[in-house]
Amino acid sequence: MLPDYRIRQRDYLLEIGRALTAQLNLNEVLQLILRFAADILDSQFALIALVEPDGSYQIRQAYAIPQPVLDLLVARMKRAPTARRAMRVLEEELVAIAREFGLGYWQVVSLPLAEADQFLGAIYVFRTRGGSFSANDRLILQAFADQAAIAVKNARLYERLTQEQQRLESILQHSAEGLVIMDAQHRILSFNQAISRLTGIDQAQAKGQTFESVVKLKNKRSGLTLEEAEAGGWPIVGSDKPLVLECDLQRADGQLLSVEVAFVALFNRQGRLLNIIAHIHDLTRFRVAEEMKNTFISAISHELKTPVALIKGYADTLRRQDARWDEQTIRDGLAVISEEADHLAELIDNLLSASRAQAGSFKLTPVELDLDELVTRAVRKWELQHPSHRFIVRLRHDLPLVLADEARINQVINNLLSNAVKYSPAGSTILVDGYTTSNEVVVYVADEGPGIPPDEQARIFDRFYRSPAAVQEGKPGTGLGLYLTRAIVEAHGGRIWVESDGKHGSKFYFSLPQSHARPNSINGSPARPS
Ligand code: ADP
């Protein structure tokens, strides 16, 4: 028959084993271990110290040790340079402190908790009375130390797993791409914020539903749908090649978004399909940019072809051998060639400036400028070339000076006047006026054209943007004018905006800092248009 302590030891170890499997709360399991170890070894106090993940050695759980003793121990342990050394320090300190507190002679037995040669910590048991610890006591304590080592290892694994899970959840939730995790039957297990925004469907509402009923994919452009792929034998065990589909996603409000979806399959070790993960990438912006670029390319080719055709036509006509031209005809022809060459040069300059603006490398040479004078000169030129419109300049003659690059500000004024002429009917009036604020000079160009609908106003300053109406009516242009205008104004530390009700004309404003209030930076780096 087993001696009494052996039976108790077995029962205790069984109970600890149960606690270990039933719960993962490390502190509770360690408390149980200490209580049983103290009881079976007929001791009064016990404690467990652990090497924490940051390398420090700390008392993690104590049993029946008076708080002042514990506080002193914690304070003195900090002196130990290494965890292994701390194990010894703790033992010596215990005896010394027991003496200080007059707790009588303390016997201490300590054993390390080890896991595959790794020092995890130590268990300590103290007696204030009775005989000294025997070899058998040490053996018993070892059994408890082994259990404690398992508890620590489990808890650390669990902690790591939880952290890992939290990390993955956070990546999943905050990914800019739509992510859906579903089971083999396409039931949604996880639905992140991005896909919730894309579909317009609540995360909680999507969970548990089938992928197809929540993420409505239509108008396949390339690839295979999940259904088609599965009918063809996808997914194939061992292949991590995603299935890529390009199509439209129908939002809850019926709107269609252009998307690319990549499906990836996850298998278990036995090759059973566990999950399908869908990455949904919104291509709308990409498509819009692509469309704008195409519009730009066709616009620019048209814009380039017209002056080239005129130059070529006039040059060929004037050099014909079989014709004799009078001086006036020759002069008129050459004037057209010269004007169209200027037009071409201006177009090329706009293109180069646009790419510089995009790269953020405008070169500005700021000088003190009188905007009234600059505007009046520019308007005079437009008046001569466009008698179809009535021009009025109402700027005050005593406007404060601004510190700006003359050629660039001329470009701004010319672009605004050119648009006003282009987009307003013959016979209408174009008014240039302005005012000052405490530190700026504001100039505006008002026309009596069709105006700009409010929903287009934010986009007209985008690169390549041309309103559908302008394109439809065949108005010449490249969609670069306002983009450049804004880049120039912002490079000077100014602002540009438009006011229009979309019916009765537009008013384009730009502001420049007054020269006494020097802008923070005139460094040629325009704020990037969005
Ligand atoms: P472009 O004139 O070459 O098309 P801009 O960048 O100068 O390019 O203008 C962008 C768009 O803003 C134009 O296509 C036009 O639709 C609109 N727009 C600009 N100025 C005016 C204006 N004064 N009146 C009405 N629409 C305008």
Image (spheres, helix red, strand yellow):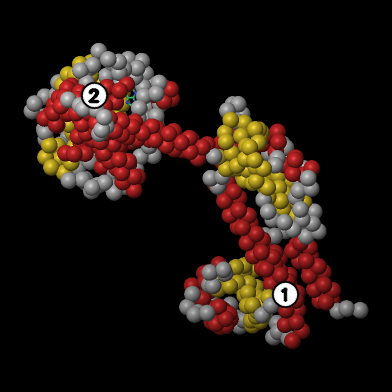
Q: Quadrant of residue 48?
A: bottom right
Query: Is the CB of mark 2 within 8 Å of ligand 1?
Result: yes
Q: Quadrant of the N terminus?
A: bottom right
Residue 434 visible in the displayed image: no
**359 to 72, vertically: above or below:** above
Residue 12 point in image, percent of width and height: 79, 69
Q: Nearer the viewer, residue 321 or 526?
A: 321
Q: Residue at x 63, y 37 (%)?
A: 221
Label 2 CA crowd tier, 10 Å (few <14, some 14–19, many 20+): many
Q: Residue at x 50, y 40 (%)?
A: 286
Location of the C terminus by quadrant is top left
Task: Locate residue 298 relative to residue 320 in the image: left or right.
Answer: right
Residue type at numbered disc 1 = Asp
- Total labels: the figure holds 2
Q: Quadrant of residue 253?
A: top right
Indicate the position of residue 471 as horizontal and vertical percent values.
41, 25
Q: In the structure shown, which secondary structural element does the residue marked by tag 2 occupy?
A: strand
Residue where numbered disc 1 is placed: 146
* Ligand 1 rendered quadrant: top left
Q: Amino acid at mark 2?
A: Val
